[in-house]
Amino acid sequence: MLGAYILGIESSCDETAASVVYSGERMVSNVIFSQIAAHQPYGGVVPELASREHLKAIVPVVRQALADAGQTYQSIDALAVTQGPGLAGALLVGIGYAKALAFALDKPLIAVNHLEGHIHAVLLEERQKEERQKNNREMNFPVLALVVSGGHTHLYLAEQRDGNWSYRNIGHTRDDAAGEAFDKVAKLLGLGYPGGPIIDRLSTHGDPTAVKFPPAQLKHRDRKDKSDGSEGPRFDFSYSGIKTAVLRYVEVHEMRASIEARRKALSTIEKPGLEDYLLHTDRKTLDLVASFQRALVSDLVMKTLAAARACNAATLFVTGGVAANNELRQRFEQDAAMEGLPVYFPSRPLSTDNAAMIAAAAYPKFLSGEFAPMDFSAEAGLARR
Ligand code: KG4
Ligand code: ZN
């Protein structure tokens, strides 16, 4: 097999990232510039601001990734860039820069689906472990991959033939993504942005059985609707109901004033730590947060395992920003083990957006000569295919 150093570039949302990966199996550099500080005052990602931040960061981030890897523009074998899904303006910054580099350097350019990237984050790290341990563990197929992040809650059935990967989308959220629900609930409760990491940490301090969210608020309909061209049953998610249920709880329990006080107090602290959050978060809110996380995690695990059974999946991947969640990992590990299903997660740094996963996903395409034409463009809505 042909070894190759691939420079990956990722700019689909609020991280400007570049990484060099050798042959999809060894991450030699990984640079991530997070824009969180720029978006924090707005309580979410502002698309226009994201594009401008990417423009500022992309050149230094790519230079750093090459330097960290001991590589140069000339020495790399190919470039890879996220084509979508994501914010159109943000994607275009990465694509424009990658195209210019590929053209100037006369190197092949590979376009990568961001969600395929999240799946390859798991594969990259498993290959790295194998390389270290030299114990080529066989992975069984089909693989069911849950990609769960701020923009997506998607289930893919993945197969590999002759080194080439194929994916079939068998479910996705009908409204909010799971990460979006974490972010919106945190914003609503005056806990800041991004919501996932802070709710994750606060949840261990609350009672997850305190507030009951009826399953109707996490409604789910398996469907055999083939209108989108897919085959077989679908396993969809829905997380806007639980967000509304949290809002209703806040109103019924008259929590507005204490939320405002918390929002104000936290906004005066430059980088609030767990102690700061705990100091300003009352028991009722801690219980609400823990119950919200318990309900959302239970729903994700239950539906994903139901899909795994229905599709006879031999292996489970859980990846994307929300895969960093502690309760989600524990529940998947525990419940999948009961069904004898091996489950793999990326490490936490590779769960959230990064470019190593893009460079890793590009390697099979590099081997099969699947290069992007120079006139390809961003596809903001690439996910549903
Ligand atoms: O994959 P990612 O970096 O970007 C997208 O492609 O969306 O995911 C970011 C999302 C955010 O919604 C964030 O709140 C969530 O992942 N997230 C978490 C945790 N860490 C990040 N959600 C729950 N628990 C976490 N520990
Ligand atoms: Zn992502």
Image: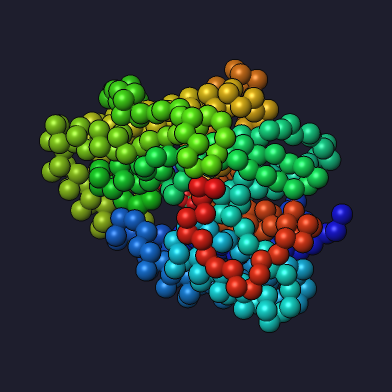
Most distant residue in the bottom direction? 104
Is residue 42 something that shows in the picture? yes
Percent across and percent down for residue 14 are: 45, 60
Residue 207, picture quadrant: top left
Q: Residue at x 49, y 30 (%)?
A: 224
Most distant residue in the right direction? 1
Residue 219 falls left or right of residue 115: left
Most distant residue in the top direction? 338
Q: Up-down: is 217 above or below 111? A: above
Residue 373 falls left or right of residue 23: left
Is residue 125 something that shows in the picture? no
Percent across and percent down for residue 349 are: 56, 50
Q: Residue at x 53, y 42 (%)?
A: 229
Percent across and percent down for residue 96 are: 55, 74
Residue toward you, 231 or 293: 231
Residue toward you, 229 or 309: 229
Q: How is the image coloured?
A: rainbow
Residue 187 falls left or right of residue 360: left
Residue toward you, 33 or 139: 139
Residue 111 falls left or right of residue 139: left
Q: Residue at x 37, y 59 (%)?
A: 45
Where the N terminus falls, by quadrant?
A: bottom right
Percent across and percent down for residue 329 are: 53, 33
Residue toward you, 90 or 37: 90
